Amino acid sequence: MTQPPSLTPTPPENPLHRTDYPRVVVVAVSSVVAVAGSFFGSGAVAGTPVAEAAGGALGSDATAVAPGGAAFSIWTLIYIGLLALAVWQALPAHHADSRQRALGWWIAVSMILNAAWILAIQFDLLAVSVAVIAVLLGVLVHIFLGLSRSRPSTTLEAVVVDGTMFLYLGWVMVATVANTAAALESADLDPFGWGADAWAVIVLAVVAAVSVLVAFAGRGRLAVAAGIAWGLIWIAIARTQDGGLMSTPAAVAASVAAAVAVVSAVAVRLWARDRQAS
């Protein structure tokens, strides 16, 4: 005999929790804080452009691993992505999203750290800025590993959430190197006395090696590679421009590192896709 259908409603897969709304609000507010900080750091409304702040320590000709000024335009895309992410996660359908529950607070922290880094630069606190960006990098790595453990449910999520945070990570990896070099140069420190060219080649080789590790950890996430390659290409460009800090070794090392970042991500992505198909 056929059983009558149950009148008990099926509970939702991810029921709303009391912590969901505070997280959604904090992420949204943090995105506004980050964007407001960007206006302050760009000098568009107030403050001093980052390249000119701290005595020009972060200018394109300050160190052998400083990206060209146009490299910082990537922040526009990142900030647009962060605002889009804030709107996406604020939609009622995404309040109980499991990935946002696990990483939403961390995403908010990354935005606040971004604003804190700009403030440190504005107040000429280079050593503090290195500490802040190092913590920011650690937070972004945590987010990257967390997002890489699962697939986005839609293409929109893949672009807005994963794409934004991975591009963010890739650029901050290069920015951390440039920021650290600027602080060391400002303090007139040259460990072992090897010179700017030698250190540039060594550091950029490390960036290339790390990009390979990131490619494997994320199964070939292209947005990370794009962020890394963008910064490295602009380092190479800055080292070949007349009137700037020219360095053929640094330019070559940055170009090779950019190629390694892109090729390794594409290769790992194709390998992972073939393995999944078989």
Image (cartoon, rainbow, N blue to C red):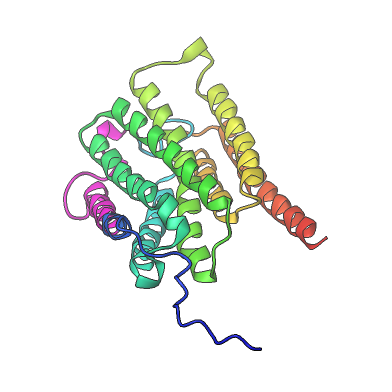
Q: Quadrant of the C terminus?
A: bottom right
Quadrant in which the N terminus is drawn: bottom right
Decide: is 231 above or below 29: above
Q: Residue at x 66, y 44 (%)?
A: 216
Image coordinates of residue 205 in percent, x first then y, are: 62, 31
* Residue 153 coordinates in the image, percent (x, y): 54, 67
Give the residue furthest to the left.
46
> Can residue 74 be seen in this snapshot?
no
Is residue 244 or residue 99 the one in the foreground? 99
Residue at 24% across, 56% down? 29
The residue under the point 57% across, 22% down is: 198
Task: Based on the picture, tell me whether residue 87 belongs to the magenta stretch.
Answer: no
Please identify the quarter of the rendering in which residue 90 is found.
bottom left
* Range shown magenta: 28-57
Q: Nearer the viewer, residue 69 or 144?
A: 144
- The image quadrant of residue 80 is bottom left
Measured as percent of width and height from the top left, residue 62 is found at 39, 32
Tell me if 189 is positioned left or right of 239 in this view: left
